[in-house]
Amino acid sequence: MTDTQLQEPTVSIASPAVGREEIHKVHEVLRSGRLSGGEAVDAFGSEFADYCDVAHGIPTSNGTTALHAALAALDIGPGDTVVTTPFSFIATANAIRHVGAEPLFADIDPETYNLDPDRVDAVAADAADGVDAILAVHLYGCPAPVSELQSVADRHDAALVEDCAQAHGATYRGDPVGSFGDAGCFSFYPTKNMTTGEGGMVVTDRDDVAQRCHSFIDHGRSPDGGHERVGHNFRMTDICAALGRVQLSKLDDFVAARRENAAQFDDAIDGDAIQPPVEPADCRHAYHQYTVRTADRAALADHLADYGVDSAVYYPTPIHEEPAYDGFDVQLPAAERAASEVLSVPVHPELSPRDVRSISLALTEYST
């Protein structure tokens, strides 16, 4: 490095792509005086369902409440067990506990970081009372092997729920994620592939699940206006929905930009010091994160910072080793090793050509 090169990261790990059209649509809602319970939420739900090629889209307040609502709508509750991944944001497992069920952790595929169907099958087979659901995450935007997981779910008479929080625009065998299981759940947090500021979505082809989700997120309200169950206020606002409708119209372009950036980084890595992410042949990766593996990630992070490039670790601690999950005595070596080796670099669509060159140069120099 020379004295003129940057010493502090200036290329951020994430940057929401929000423009004038989003601002205009939000202003329209503000001027209308109908900030919640208006037409924008219903329209966004319908449009997002169409995008995912499913019958129903139920907007929620965030991705965690989407998971919570979907599990509740599938009658997952106290006494039930749900097999899920230990390598994800903790909200995935928390949602299981929020409905009173017990998570069972299965190990991951070390190449894709998603659930290994064989390990899921083994965990389900070992469960004394069987399992009631499988909650699969499409981590970093890479689709999990949902056909194989559906077969496992069918074999154990369990529901399949997709956590698509990082996978907007990803496809598996040509079909959108979220369209495979009994329900799919998305997050629209500012760092995601599209954003509503805060927000979430449950998508499903099941009429019964959709009806119960609508009820659950609105204090248990029934179609006749009564309250048939104890629910929550997990509703999305019209402000968020207006932002989301514009973002959805741009999502394919956002994902295309992420994939183009990722392809350049793939080309830049030339050597064994860095292992680039894997895109299985039957998947279209949405690259929420461009996550590499390396034996000394602190050294790689320092090297990237020398080029003005931010980086982050998603996730440094497997869920079963988090303090909140003390007592989950399981050994999951693939997840534990991944947690010690992964590092994510910026891949978002707001990267400039100069940013992409800086990241690529840093990756090339470190990997060779």
Image (spheres, helix red, strand yellow):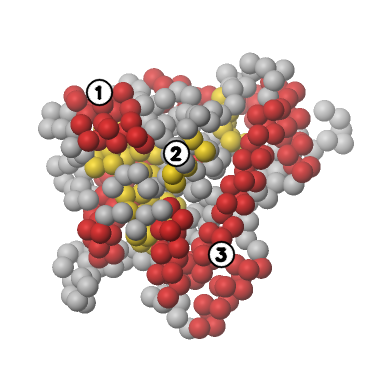
Say if residue 15 shows up in the picture: yes
Give residue 302's quadrant in the image. Answer: top right
Q: Position of residue 264 (x, y in %)?
A: 69, 34
Instruction: Examine the rendering and report whether any part of residue 202 can be seen.
Output: no
**Residue nearest the observer in this picture, 316 or 259:** 259
Location of the C terminus by quadrant is top right
Q: Which residue is mark 2?
A: 172
| Tag 2 secondary structure | strand
> As drawn, is 11 to the left or to the right of 182?
right
State the residue position of label 3: 246
Residue sitting at the far front: 174
- Disc 3/disc 1 C-alpha distance (Å): 43 Å
Structural distance between the alpha carbons of marks 2 and 1: 24 Å
Identify the residue at image location x=56%, y=72%: 26
Q: Whole-Å distance between the Cαs marked 3 and 2?
A: 25 Å
Amino acid beneath label 3: Val
User: Is the C-beta separation of discs 3 and 2 under 8 Å?
Assistant: no
Q: Which residue is mark 1?
A: 122
Residue depicted at x 26% and y 45% = 97
On the image, the x and y values in percent for residue 6 come to: 79, 38
Q: Position of residue 287 (x, y in %)?
A: 56, 40
Q: Earlier in the sequence, mark 2 or mark 1?
A: 1
**Left-right relation of 8 to 120:** right
- Residue 142 lies, in percent from the top left, at 49, 36
Amino acid type at circle 1 is Ala
Tell me the crowding category of disc 3: few under 14, some 14 to 19, or many 20 or more residues within 10 angstroms, Cα based. Answer: many
* Circle nearer the N terminus (3, 1): 1
Q: Residue at image x 59%, y 22%?
A: 275
Question: Is 80 situated above or below 105?
Answer: below
Q: The disc labelled 2 sits on which kind of residue?
A: Tyr
Circle 2 packing at 10 Å, graded few (<14), some (14-19), many (20+), is many
